[in-house]
Image (cartoon, rainbow, N blue to C red):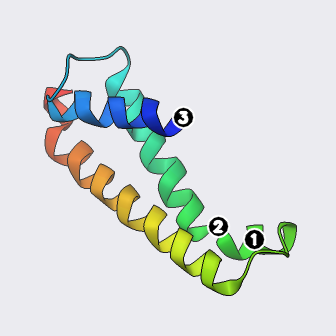
Amino acid sequence: MILFLWAGYALAGAGVIEHLPFTKLALTAICVVYLGRAVAFPFLKPVFPANTQTFWLVSSGVCLVIGLIHLVGVIELWDAL
């Protein structure tokens, strides 16, 4: 459900759907969460020892890519948000 909400904010920020409340704040927070998750895996790994190294690398890579895409969009559209 959270990812659908975040996708809605991304689409609103891109101008695909109607502007949502707090778009600038929400997109900034979403970027921080994705990028934070991407770099925090060494600290999270001991908390979830059942997950494999492959899981951590792939999921962190996906979060990094999504976070960077959001970051580029926020930077490019900052004044329009």
Q: Determine the CA span between mark 2 and mark 1.
A: 5 Å
Does dot 3 land on a helix, a strand or a loop?
Answer: helix
The answer to the question of whether label 3 and label 1 lie on touching residues, with beta carbons closer than 8 A, is no
Mark 1, Cα crowd under 10 Å, few <14 / some 14-19 / many 20+, is few
Q: Residue at coordinates 64% horizontally, 67% vertically from top-left?
A: 40
The image quadrant where one finds the C terminus is: top left
The image quadrant where one finds the N terminus is: top right
Q: Name the amino acid, label 3.
A: Ile
The answer to the question of whether label 2 and label 3 lie on touching residues, with beta carbons closer than 8 A, is no
- The answer to which of marks 3 and 1 sits earlier in the sequence is 3
- Residue named by callout 3: 2
Q: Give the left or right position of residue 46, taking residue 18 as reference.
A: right
- Residue named by callout 1: 43
Q: Determine the CA span between mark 3 and mark 1.
A: 23 Å
Q: Name the amino acid, label 1.
A: Phe
Q: Residue at coordinates 54% horizontally, 34% vertically from top-left?
A: 2
Residue 39 picture location, percent across and down: 57, 69
Mark 2, Cα crowd under 10 Å, few <14 / some 14-19 / many 20+, is few
Q: Give the left or right position of residue 16, taking residue 70 as reference.
A: left
Which of the 4 image quadrants contains residue 51?
bottom right
Q: Give the left or right position of residue 14, taking residue 46 as reference.
A: left
- Residue named by callout 2: 40
